[in-house]
Image: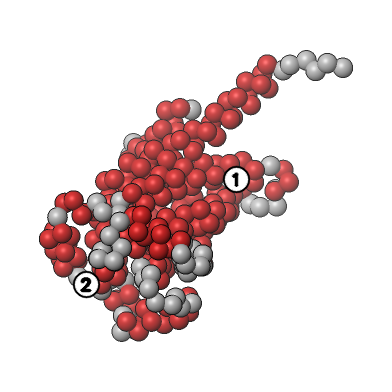
Amino acid sequence: MTRIPNRAQDEERLKDSKARFQSYLHGGTSSLLSTLIVFPVYKTVFRQQIHNIQVHRAVDQLRKEGLLKLYRGVTPPLLMRTLSGTLLFGLQDTFLRLLSLPSFSVIPHSCLPSVAGLGVGIVEAIVFTPFERVQNVLQSGRNDRHLPTLKSVLMKLKAQKISSGFYRAFLPIATRNALGSALYFGLKGPLSAAVAGQGLSPLASSFMSGTLTSMAISLTLYPLSVLVANMQVGVQAEPKGVTACWRMLWNSRQRSVVLLYRGGALVILRSCITWGITTAIYDRQQKSSS
């Protein structure tokens, strides 16, 4: 029997496909804009993490290097953040739709955004660890002389084993990304609703929810970011495992939590601006297209 087309069903499928595509597009756009705005703050934090210096010394280093070098290394994070935002919001929306099917009814509805975020974080780590590796090598001043260009960094890492080259520090990155994504999508909605209840506009509510969520994530996962940066910055010596690198990092910070969190204030500032802007732009685009 010839199937009679159901126009309403076809229109619904088309609308659903368009909504899923827009989640990817809007995620990439919002992440690109926020990255360009916040990159100088990010680079200042990175210098503190690597050289264990105070913020004014890190800023002074970048000032002396000049404006041209300020955005040295921006290409990998710009690509990474844009692609990451595309996957982060797009895949989370896709996973959330799949988890909402009756076959996954055992998962509480309120937990679905976090579970979807957990899966997205693991995918992110698989895709973007090489980008983060290249970015960290490029941003370190100690690599300027023998690895002056992006091409030289790529050639150096390509010559190494994948676990010590492009996928150095994969395990802590996967842990950080999975937990961070789960927290972001689990907290973003409830916080936005709570802030909106105080009389703020939808745009302000989205910005505040992104800001508060990122603050919680940054404070919780900052040590993992410091560990990743220190594991990925070197390209010469035989790499050590995660446990050995953590011991070295802990000892280098004189076994002090305060020193381990050096640069944390700027991380919170950078994260608040980045995710506040990203969340506000993304939510605004989603509401405009719905």
Amino acid type, label 2: Ile
In the picture of the structure, the residue carrying the numbered disc 2 is 53
Q: Is mark 1 on a helix, strand or loop?
A: helix
Q: In this view, does 230 lie above or below 183?
A: below
Circle 2 Cα neighbour tier, 10 Å, few/some/many (<14 / 14–19 / ≥20)? some
Q: Which sits in the foreground, 124 or 7? A: 124
Q: Is mark 2 on a helix, strand or loop?
A: loop
Left or right? Give the position of 163 relative to 80.
Answer: right
Q: Report x, y in % for residue 266.
A: 26, 61
- On residue 95, the disc is 1
Q: In this view, does 287 lie above or below 175?
A: above
Q: Report x, y in % for residue 236.
A: 37, 73
Residue 15 visible in the shown view: yes
Gap between marks 1 and 2 measured at Cα: 41 Å
Q: Report x, y in % for residue 174.
A: 51, 62
Q: In which quarter of the image is residue 36?
A: top left
Q: Residue at x 64, y 46 (%)?
A: 99
